[in-house]
Amino acid sequence: MNQSDQTLDLLVVGGGINGVGIAADAAGRGLSVCLCEMGDLASATSSWSTKLIHGGLRYLENYDFLLVRKSLMEREVLTRAAPHIIKPLAFQIPQLNNSRNSLLIQAGLFLYDNLAKRDRFKASRRVSYGEDSPLNPSIRRGFEYWDAQVDDSRLVVLNALQARDKGAEILNYCECQRIEPEGDGWKVTLFDHRQGRELVRHCHVLVNAAGPWVASLLESLTHAPAPHSIRLVKGSHIVVPRIHPGKQAYMLQHHDGRVVFVIPYLGKYSLIGTTEEEYNGDPGAAKISNDEINYLVSIANLYFRKSVLRSEIVSTFSGVRPLIDEDEKNASKVSRDYRLELIEDPAPILSVYGGKVTTYRLLAERVMNELGQYFPRMRGNWTKKALLPGGDFDMSENLFRELASKYAWLGPEIINRWLGSYGTLSYELLRNARSLGDMGVHFGHGLYQREVDYLCRKEWAYSAEDVLWRRSKLGYQFDDKQKLSLQNYIEQTYRQ
């Protein structure tokens, strides 16, 4: 029986973090699973986040204690599961005269420290700033707390790898176009944009995890109104040359009540964001506005000695977050939690509304528990103690030493980048390599043919953009000529 004839247990639409998390969870419970994504994995909201695994300190102001507690607990789970791509990071909160009351912040940080057990994260503390501070001289005091930084698109890819390792079929660049009732399930017609042809899959249950497209996709497939409205909120970021030394990040308070993060990024940059603007267009076409750039630049310049100039902006990105519409006037106060909506007639469709990166695993677990009624032989929860691919090591320093002793010819820069992307999967990339000559063509900035081949064969990369922006972040360094060379190689080798 080929794949088009087999009736799957589950077909998941959407290759963002929620979709791949659900696919991995389901496959690990013994279900037959297919995931389809109309673009590349993590090509929308899941690669344009602030790149944090965090409890959400500011959510405490909205009394969203349960969400913060869940997120803090997941912060521990995910940091253990993927130590190569998720790392603890100190955040400092400088205090201006018009900042939030110090006692209020201290109380919030006490809650943040104690709402959930901490194993990998230090407690918060007061900090003082001297003459050598990168902050403006008027800033003399503040606070420090801990959260984690994540490579968001790699998190998606690793979950997709985990799903495939458990038997799931992963189809990126395959768009869900039609569904038809068939017995007690669905006949699903996909369109493969790479091959220019239709594919058919049959499934008992359909999961709609299309992120900001969740409502519009449900309406287009079922020809009926979606049961919930989605509120689209655009969050934009700028990337600039590093504006402060040290490993710490900063959370900057603004008089409008919002906060902006300034985060060390890829060693040589600062990531500044995010904004929150209502958005009504195509989620895939969101761009930063001049007003948003001015907003982020002005806040950074209010706090730091080194001025951020618009002319120095290296890159910008905007992601559209699907929030449950709660009729709140202020988008900052809309909950980042999620809601599941199950339609059973004529066959089961479960749609995922809302959610955040930090709680994707919990969301996936709840989805599968809710769908347990359709799969009585399905195995139980398993992901809480599972490691993501490449995460099976204790300390980065030890893994670095192991790789450096065996593959010293790679050099520390490449080894460090691979550790932060692949972890122990680095050994799979290197297999029988004994010198740089075994790595093949060098496309620039430490990207060799062997790594590109691995990404195309094992991680569903089909273009230079897939490789440079979602499987790595080398796109910041590649010039147009180098990008074209890489694109030509991929097309000639993998699009025969």
Image (spheres, helix red, strand yellow):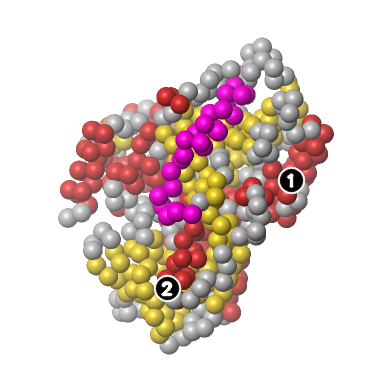
Residue nearest the viewer, comparing 199 with 381: 199
Task: Tell me, yes or no, whether the highlighted magenta stretch contains residue 291.
Answer: yes
Which residue is identified by label 2?
221
* Amino acid type of the residue that numbered disc 1 sits on in the rendered structure: Glu
Taking the spot 66% from the left edge, 12% from the top edge, the residue there is 131
Examine the rendered structure and indicate whether residue 136 appears above or below residue 230.
Answer: above
Identify residue type, mark 2: Leu
The residue segment tinted magenta is 280-304
Question: Which x, y percent locates residue 476?
Answer: 38, 33
Residue 222 makes an appearance in the image = yes
**The label number, if any, that marks residue 169 in the structure image:** none
Q: In this image, 408 relative to 383: left or right?
A: left
Q: Residue at x 53, y 29 (%)?
A: 297
Report the residue marked by disc 1.
Answer: 61
Which residue is nearer to you in this view: 184 or 345? 345
Q: As displayed, is residue 196 above or below residue 180? A: above
List x then y, in percent, for residue 315: 42, 34
Residue plotted at (28% across, 61% down): 193
**Looking at the image, which residue sits at the far bottom?**
183
Disc 1 packing (10 Å; few <14; some 14–19; many ≥20): few
Element on which disc 1 rests: helix
Q: Is residue 125 magenta?
A: no
Magenta stretch: helix, strand or loop mostly: helix
